[in-house]
Image: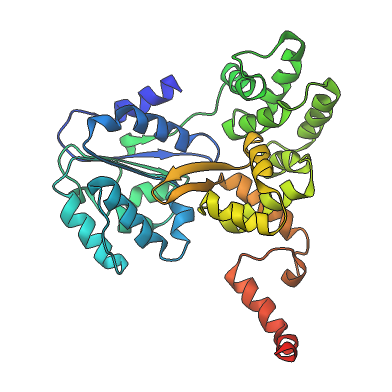
Amino acid sequence: MGSRINDLLSLLNIGFDDALFVGICGFGGIGKTTIAKAVYNRIFPTFDRHSFLSDVREQATQCKGLVSLQKKLLKDIFKSDYDIEDLHRGKKLIEERVCKEKVFLVLDDVDSKEQIGALAGGLNWFGQGSRVIITTRDENILNIAKVSTDKIYRPPFLDHENSLQLFSWHAFQSKQPPEEYMQLSCVVAIHSEGLPLTLEVFGSYLSDHSDKETWESTLQTLKEIPPVEVQRRLKISYDNLENDNQKAIFLDAACFFIGWTKETLISIWEACGYHPKSAICRLIKRSLLKFENRWDGECLMMHDHIRDMGREIVLEESRMEPGKRSRLWSDGEIMEVLEEHKPLLRRFK
């Protein structure tokens, strides 16, 4: 992390008076959010006004998602609530209020022009000395935000040494694997192709297993999957969950509940009889779920690859007939299924 943090800090030009946008662009799972958080935690105390808006793409899909993000941005910066009725009003408020302030803002996982326009419409929205970091998979988003090409950081994939070290921290809680597991760990490092997310998930999964047979079986499966198929690699951790409750909670989380508070989710899953507290602990340990503190509480977060892997599992239940799947999250498919069952619903009235 040290070299990546220093690379990003050099682009931020801290100390200069002009406002500046900086981008982090790269493949999903390569560590864009992790790097942005590390830099944010290091330098936010030097700014009186600051905000980290995580998972913008996912939050924007929720009801009044962009308006909620505007409210959070203003609350973070000014420590008070703002009544925002619509997107246009939110833009005006941010532009009028924030333009007088030296702000450090991170917009994490942005994927549309609308998100940029709602939260950081231009350098003139921010006061002198402000810094805005935008993380995205799509370089076109940074072009829309008018980020200079020399202010875009592209995190590299990990080399073998760093891959082995990251895997070891998750699998053994140490910098290097034990000697008897060194060769097997090297296999994971090679087949991860330097993608941090894969190393984290497999390290967390294999940390529960001390028998070499399980390791060898898992690694053989990993070898048989083409390196580009990240979701299929990650699915090994799902397939080896201990019981149906853990699997059900994971699929629910992937399909419906990203951004929901932990307290609400526990009450829902308890009503389903899933014994969620122990299951959530296991899923967190496997790096399949995580919770982050936000303005509205401790909220469920999930990496896009892991979310997509969960949804793909549900799609495989019946690709052509949505009504035969255990879960539906697409508005269009929900309406299609309801339309198909209208005669049956009328009979029950």
Residue 327 in which image quadrant:
bottom right
Q: Nearer the viewer, residue 123 or 238?
A: 238
Compared to residue 138, the image places residue 330 above or below, namely below
| Figure disc tally | 0
Q: Nearer the viewer, residue 114 or 107?
A: 107
Which x, y percent locates residue 45? 27, 30
Residue 38 in which image quadrant:
top left
Residue at 42%, 20% in the rendered image: 3
- Residue at the right extreme? 213
Side of 83 relative to 230 (left or right) = left
Say whether residue 229 is visible. Answer: no
Residue at 61%, 15% in the rendered image: 174
The way the protein has been coloured in the rendering is rainbow
Side of 61 relative to 117 (left or right) = right
Which x, y percent locates residue 40? 35, 33
Which x, y percent locates residue 272? 70, 59
Compared to residue 109, the image places residue 222 above or below, namely above
Residue at 19%, 50% in the rendered image: 98
Residue 24 in which image quadrant:
top left
Side of 127 relative to 173 (left or right) = left
Q: Nearer the viewer, residue 21 or 89?
A: 89
Which x, y percent locates residue 312? 69, 54
Side of 235 relative to 63 (left or right) = right
Say whether residue 139 is visible. Answer: yes
Q: Quick one: quadrant of the C terminus?
A: bottom right
